[in-house]
Image (cartoon, rainbow, N blue to C red):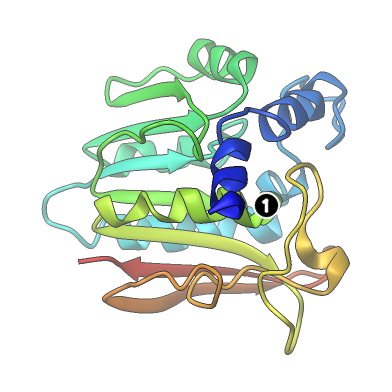
């Protein structure tokens, strides 16, 4: 019981994730001379971004009736901006308030809205499909578990993760922040313990082996019900 209470208590505080993510943008830790709000090469490198946009666009346009999409961890919206037109409504969420304010000023579409939320702590907006692109890889197992528990409300969940090449031990725990599990030669597999996400269907949409990034960036579609 004590361990569960300690876990619950950790999830009641915005530290370290909110503070860590705010620091990334305040200090420009992901590095760019272009903008103070820059979500890193993973959101800008054409080798990574273009295949992802093509893959998600293909998925979204396969429906007769456009989906409502919730972009969980939208970052600087360099990627999401290309997907909005293929949706009925697009709800973009991030934990950094100044980043959300910047996005609201820069990106304006009738079917687009932005929200500042902590994915692990706050209720998530309703939608048909949730996108999490290289978000969970920065979070501790406790926070990942909290977020995954909420994803059962979405019919479709599309998760993109940066993984080591070849075999690896999944889901080694980390402290939430700038880094990922790659430093531990690990990566997230949400179907494996301690998460064991229950999905009706699983299908890999995309796998990108980048020349400029160690490992492989994998995008997987989960149909939840």
Q: Residue at x 31, y 33 (%)?
A: 125
* Quarter-of-image position of residue 164: bottom right
Residue 46 pos. (x, y %): 68, 53
**Up/down of 192 relative to 65, above or below:** below
Report helix, strand or loop for mark 1. Answer: loop
Task: Depth check: give the residue in front, 215 or 175.
Answer: 175
Task: Locate residue 9, reporting x and y percent.
Answer: 59, 36
Q: Quadrant of residue 223?
A: bottom left
Residue 114: x and y, percent? 43, 22
Q: Residue furthest left?
A: 64
Q: Is residue 36 above or below residue 121?
A: above
Relative horizontal placement of residue 213, taking residue 84 as reference (left or right)? right
Residue 201 x/y as whole percent: 30, 78
In the picture, residue 160 is in which quadrant? bottom right
On the rendered structure, is 146 left or right of 174?
left
Q: Which residue is mark 1?
A: 140
Residue 57 relative to residue 60: left or right: right
Q: Residue furthest bottom?
A: 167
Location of the C terminus (image quadrant)? bottom left
Residue in view at x 56 percent, y 31 percent: 12
**Residue drawn where x is 73% and y is 68% of the image:** 172
């Amino acid at each position: 019981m004590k361990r569960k209470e300690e876990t619950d208590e950790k999830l009641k505080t915005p530290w370290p994730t909110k503070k860590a993510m705010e620091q990334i943008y305040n200090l420009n830790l992901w590095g760019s001379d272009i903008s103070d709000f820059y979500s890193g090469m993973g959101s800008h490198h054409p080798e990574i971004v273009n295949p992802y946009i093509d893959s998600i666009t293909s998925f979204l346009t396969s429906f007769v009736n456009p989906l409502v999409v919730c972009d969980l961890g939208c970052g600087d919206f360099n990627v999401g901006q290309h997907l909005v037109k293929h949706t009925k409504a697009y709800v973009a969420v991030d934990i950094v308030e100044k980043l959300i304010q910047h996005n609201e000023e820069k990106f304006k579409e009738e079917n687009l809205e932005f929200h500042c939320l902590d994915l692990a702590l706050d209720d998530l907006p309703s939608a048909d499909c949730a996108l999490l692109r290289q978000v969970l890889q920065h979070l501790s197992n406790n926070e990942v578990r909290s977020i995954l528990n909420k994803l059962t409300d979405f019919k479709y969940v599309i998760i993109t993760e940066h993984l080591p090449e070849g075999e690896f031990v999944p889901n080694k725990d980390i402290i939430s922040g700038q880094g990922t599990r790659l430093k531990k030669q690990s990566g997230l597999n949400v179907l494996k313990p301690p998460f064991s996400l229950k999905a009706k269907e699983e299908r890999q949409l995309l796998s990108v082996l980048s020349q400029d990034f160690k490992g492989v960036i994998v995008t997987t579609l989960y149909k939840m019900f």
